[in-house]
Image (cartoon, grey):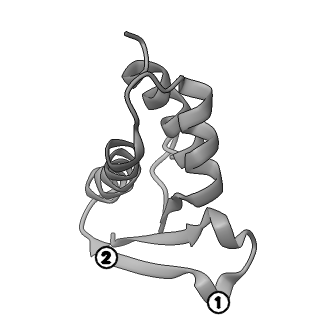
Amino acid sequence: MRFTVRVRENSHYMDESEAYTIGPYATYAEAEAACRKMVDDFLAANRKPGQGAEALFELYTTFGEDPSVEGAMPEGKTFSAWDYARRRCRELCRG
């Protein structure tokens, strides 16, 4: 099976003309890793000292990219970039 990653711009919500596709990936795990890297890269580039998790998450949901895995999904596998970003913001801004 082949998987692709569809990337939508949070700043252009529901504007498919701004979306693009990367891949293909041979496995779901590879496609999900690409999604996670995209979110992590945005958070690392935009995190400021002393910034709270909610402020960083709001920045991501306003200006970050929202990648999703496309293809025949393995049972029980889903990836939500927003859920992942929310968790990573809490982890990054803990201390």
Q: What residue is shown at x 45% (from left), y 50% (from top)?
A: 74
Measured as percent of width and height from the top left, residue 44 is found at 32, 43
Q: Secondary structure at mark 2?
A: strand
Residue 17 image label = 1
Q: Quadrant of the C terminus?
A: top left
- Work out whether 7 lies above or below 20: above
- In the image, what residue type sits under mark 1? Ser
Packing grade of label 2 (10 A; few <14, some 14-19, many >=20) is some
Kindly state the secondary structure of the residue where label 1 is placed.
helix
Closer to us: 57 or 36: 57
Q: Is residue 83 visible?
A: no
> Mark 2 = which residue?
23
Residue positioned most to the right = 14
| 34 or 15, nearer to the observer | 15
Percent x, y of residue 93: 43, 20
In screen coordinates, is 63 left or right of 70? right
Which residue lies most toward the bottom here? Answer: 17
Question: In the image, what residue type sits under mark 2?
Answer: Gly
User: Label 1: how many residues lie within 10 Å, few (<14), some (14-19) or many (20+)?
Assistant: few
Query: What residue occupies the far top of the structure in this picture?
Result: 95
Q: Disc 2 versus disc 1: distance between alpha carbons?
A: 18 Å
Tell me the tag on residue 50: none
Q: Position of residue 21 (x, y in %)?
A: 44, 80
Quadrant of the rendered image containing residue 86: top right
Q: Is residue 77 above or below residue 53?
A: below
Which quadrant of the structure image shows residue 18? bottom right
